[in-house]
Amino acid sequence: MLLLIDFSFFKSPWLATIIISMLPIFELKGSIPVGMSKTLWNEYALNFYEAFLCAMIGTIIITPILILIITPILNYLKRTKLLKGLAQKVENKIKENSLKNSRSTLIKQYFALFLFVAIPLPLTGVYMGCAIASFLKLNFWLSCLCVIIGNFISGVVITILSYFCGDFSLLIVLAFTILLVLILLFNHYKKKKLNNQNGDV
């Protein structure tokens, strides 16, 4: 089977699964199918509980770090000429998701954060969950707990999918990633075209 990305340069499926789970977009949803892929690793492919464990280790490591640094990083990037626009768009997306929960009670905010991360879809994982928690200035430890438990639920769903679908689940993840990139590019083009039209009026 021809794959678009070769993850075998990591040499070890254990290391690959942990590292990929710490990357944006891919996160746990991409790392579990990679770790279990027999096409990539042959007989060295991880079984379902090994892949799940490695993915959880990676996300548990990155969660508290993200909550602490994601807002300062965005604030810094907004002051740079090169990445100012990108940082502003990322912050607007975070605000968009955060404002949906900002009027809720505190308990509902934490539950919404857990539920948001638990849904195994693109842009609903650890990175966006941590960004929302940071933006809303929620309690650090409770936010970590909600994100990790939510990610655990998401990981269970992805592991079951990978177990029954085999390498087909990896292709699903890649297809979702490509689709996400195309949607983001289309939205960027649409907004840019709309701004140009407004400027000509």
Image (cartoon, rainbow, N blue to C red):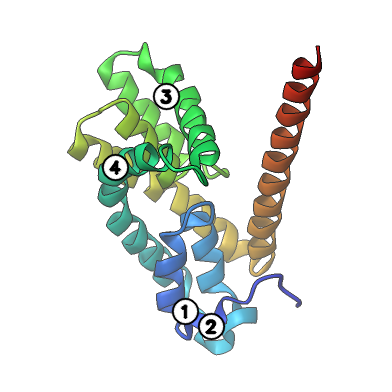
Direction from residue 172 to residue 32 in the image, left or right: left
Asked whether residue 71 is in view, the answer is: yes
Q: Report x, y in % for residue 102.
A: 37, 16
**Label at residue 13:** 1
Let me know if residue 49 appears in the view.
Answer: no
**Mark 1: amino acid:** Pro
Quarter occupied by residue 147: top left
Q: Residues within 10 Å of mark 3 (few under 14, many from 20)?
A: many
* Label 2: element kind: helix
Q: Which residue is mark 4?
A: 67
Q: Tell me where residue 86 sits by quadrant.
A: top right
190 relative to 116 in the view: left or right: right
- Residue at image position (51%, 50%) is 157
x and y, in percent, of residue 6 in the image? 62, 77
Among numbered discs 2 and 4, the one appearing first in the sequence: 2
Which tag, 3 or 1, sits closer to the chain's start?
A: 1
